[in-house]
Amino acid sequence: MKKAMSTLLVAGVVVLLTATFSFAEYAAAGAGGFPYFQLGCLIVGGLIITSLKYKYSQIYTAEAVGSFALYAVLVSLFTSPVVDAIKNMVS
């Protein structure tokens, strides 16, 4: 029971972070510049981390959630609105 609950918690956090990423990118870039590739990478990464949490019960829930959060930040850094903002700050 504990294994299923912790896996559901990780899956819930993955869904919430993915939805937050989608909303933020839609608000920043609009429908025309939405980063579908990065969204797909985020979904696949979430599925992998959730399946690893289910398969290996030694992984702590906080570790799985933290690793996905860091992965989401890394993916969001390579979207066009963030790259454009960094270009504007540098120049």
Image: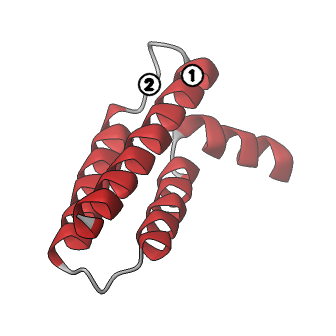
Q: Secondary structure at mark 2?
A: loop
For image coordinates 47% across by 22% down, the residue present is: 33
Q: Residue furthest front?
A: 1
Q: Residue at x 23, y 64 (%)?
A: 1
Q: Amino acid at mark 1?
A: Ala
Q: Is residue 85 above or below residue 42?
A: above
What's the residue at 53%, 21% (across, down)?
A: 26
Query: Viewed as shown, does residue 42 lie left or right of 66?
Result: left
Residue 51, visible in the rendered structure: yes
The local crowd at label 2, few if under 14, some if 14 to 19, many if 20 or more residues have their Cα within 10 Å, is some
- Residue 9 at x, y = what percent? 39, 54
Q: Nearer the viewer, residue 84 or 46?
A: 46
Reply above or below: 15 against 86.
Answer: above
Q: Are marks 1 and 2 in contact (CB under 8 Å)?
A: yes
Residue behind mark 1: 29
Q: Position of residue 22 (x, y in %)?
A: 47, 30
Q: Residue furthest bottom?
A: 58
The quadrant in which residue 29 appears is: top right
Q: Tell me residue 48's x, y (percent).
A: 22, 62
Q: Which residue is mark 2?
A: 34
Task: Identify the mark nearer the N-term, 1 or 2.
Answer: 1
Q: How many marks?
A: 2
Identity, as a three-letter code, of the amino acid under mark 2: Phe
For residue 91, say whether it is visible: no
Residue lying at 30% horizontally and 49% vertically, measured from the top left: 41
Assign a secondary structure to mark 1: helix
Most extreme residue toward the top is 31
